Amino acid sequence: VKKNYEALKQRQEEEKMVQSYSSKLDEESQPVTKWERDNQETTRELLKVKDRLIEVERNNATLQAEKQALKTQLKQLETQNNNLQAQITALQKQTVSLQEQNTTLQTQNAKLQVENSAINSQSTSLMNQNAQLLIQQSTLENENESIIKEREDLRSFYDSLIKDHEKLEQLHERQATEYESLISKHGNLKSVHKNLEVEHKDLEDRYSQLFQQKVQLEELEKGLKVEQEKMLQQNKKHEMVVVEYKKLCEEND
């Protein structure tokens, strides 16, 4: 800009000199010689060349400024390109890592599905066994109730026999034969009662064993429910990872 200003100032001074020289010639009203006309023409041509040179210098300065701006823009573009290449490389590494994680998750999911199938099979088998044990338990409870009822009936009958025995003792002298018969029957009833007590004890032992088996089955079912809840949580985590992976794939696309 400074050079353009100086050239323009010089051009104006030269024009003033030419104008002053021409005015002077007009004032003197002297005939213009050929040398003077040539000199004026040469001066005009020099002014034109200077104007052209100034214009060329202006254009050159403009081109230099544009060149510098393009260099700056090129450096910025190169920097952006390098940044984009780094981002692309990072995304490619991240994609490879996500693919490896996805493969690992798929393998784990397949294993979990196999384990879940085995657990479901075991759970079904245990539920069937539990149903059978419940049926057996119900049958034993019914049998136990029936035995208890029979025992109560036998106790009532035994009490009745005791009463009859007391009456028969009073009539012993008159009914000795009948008394001995009753004693025999009483002994038989004691044997039956004793046998019933033994059977009742056996039934109580069987009932205790069945009750323990029922408690064990209930604990096993609780454990299976806990394992199923863990597997459901793992499946939910897997689904969340798959959703995030799809989102990343969509963002990369």
Image: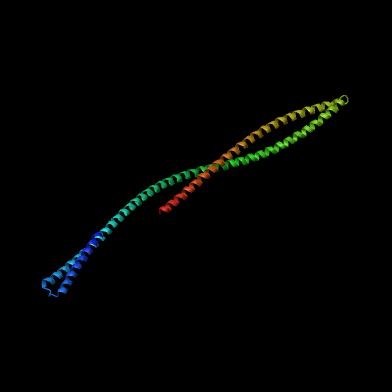
Residue 130 image position (x, y, % from top left)? 61, 40
Residue 184 image position (x, y, % from top left)? 79, 27
Q: Is residue 181 left or right of residue 119?
A: right
Considering the image in quadrants, where does the C terminus appear? bottom left
> Which residue is at 51% across, 47% downward?
236
Along the viewing direction, whichever of 135 and 192 lies nearer the viewer: 135
The residue furthest right is 174
**Taking 190 as reference, is 142 above or below it?**
below
Considering the image in quadrants, where does the N terminus appear? bottom left
Quarter occupied by residue 189: top right
Q: Is residue 156 visible?
A: yes
Residue 80 image position (x, y, % from top left)? 34, 53
Residue 67 image position (x, y, % from top left)? 27, 58
Along the viewing direction, whichever of 199 and 141 lies nearer the viewer: 141
> Which residue is at 78% across, 27% downward?
187
Q: Is residue 48 visible?
A: no
The residue furthest top is 173
Quarter occupied by residue 132: top right
Q: Is residue 92 left or right of residue 226?
A: left
Q: How many marks?
A: 0
Along the viewing direction, whichever of 81 and 12 lies nearer the viewer: 12
Q: How is the image coloured?
A: rainbow
**Taking 157 as reference, is 82 above or below it?**
below
Quarter occupied by residue 216: top right
The residue furthest front is 28
Q: Is residue 215 left or right of residue 28?
A: right
